[in-house]
Image (spheres, rainbow, N blue to C red):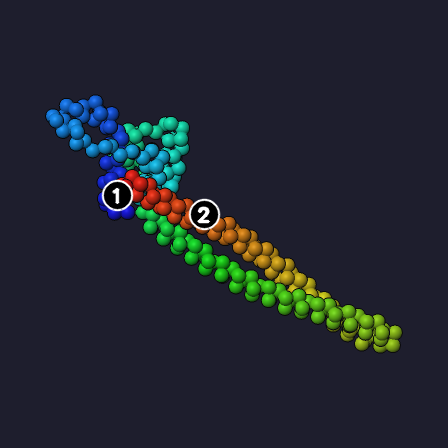
Amino acid sequence: MCGGTHHIAGALIGAAINGSRHTNHGHSHGSGHDHGQTPVQSQPSITQEIKLMYARGEIDSAAYHRLLEMARRGELSWDDLRELSARGDVATEQTVPADSPAERDQDIVRSLNKLYAHRASLEQSRTETEEILAKLEADAERLRKQAETARKKAEAVAERDEESARAYLAVRQDALARVAALEARIVALRQDLARLADLETELAAKEAELKALESQSKLAALEASIREDLIIG
């Protein structure tokens, strides 16, 4: 918004507050000029002014909702709003001034871009983890078959060749030990995949939240622009 917008908004607030005073004393300075008096334009409501202030970046989201709630309950007058504005209390409760709408939009876009980068990293990690998991599961299955084959061979030669039977059983035992090690890694990888899924869910929720904020910001700016055009017109 340009500087003229701030001047118009300030004039509107002042006019709404002092309107009753001017009405009572308006004719004392007339002296024959009453017939040329300019009609008074309709003034915005307190709610509309709060929305304009938010769209111009004069207040942050927390102050915006707080003032709207006060206005809804009838706890906020034009005098209160002017006093709060003069003291700077309608700005953020922190010492940092509220960002302009454009800066808020840029912050949202930056946050979304970071989110998309994180999501891409998560997707890559999930793909790599799934590939490793599939390979380990295939290796474990191959070793199980090897152990079973060794067992059958040991049984087949046990009566006539005890030494060969023991060799086959050793092969079987080694294969089963390797299967156990692989299964431990498989369990860990499945836990990693579960964590990745949780993070992806969190990112999806955050993305929805940021897109909602982006939509609200655009709507507030559009509404403020429409209200301002109606007031000026």
Q: Residue 230: x percent and y percent? A: 31, 41
- Relative to 226, residue 158 above or below: below
Q: Secondary structure at mark 1?
A: helix
Disc marking residue 99: none
Evaluate whether residue 158 shows in this view.
yes
At label 2, the amino acid type is Ala
- Contact check, label 2 and label 1, Cβ < 8 Å: no
Of residues 27 and 94, the one nearer the viewer is: 27
- Relative to 175, residue 199 above or below: above
Q: Residue 213: x percent and y percent? A: 42, 47
Disc marking residue 5: 1
Residue tagged 2: 212
Of residues 136 and 44, the one nearer the viewer is: 44
Number of callouts: 2
What residue is rendered at 55% in x and 56% in y?
196
Q: Secondary structure at mark 2?
A: helix
**Residue found at the far left of this picture:** 31
Q: Residue 100: x percent and y percent? A: 31, 47
Q: Quadrant of residue 142?
A: bottom right
Evaluate whether residue 87 shows in this view.
no
- Relative to 210, residue 149 above or below: below
What residue is rendered at 54% in x and 52% in y?
201
Q: Is residue 156 left or right of residue 142?
A: right
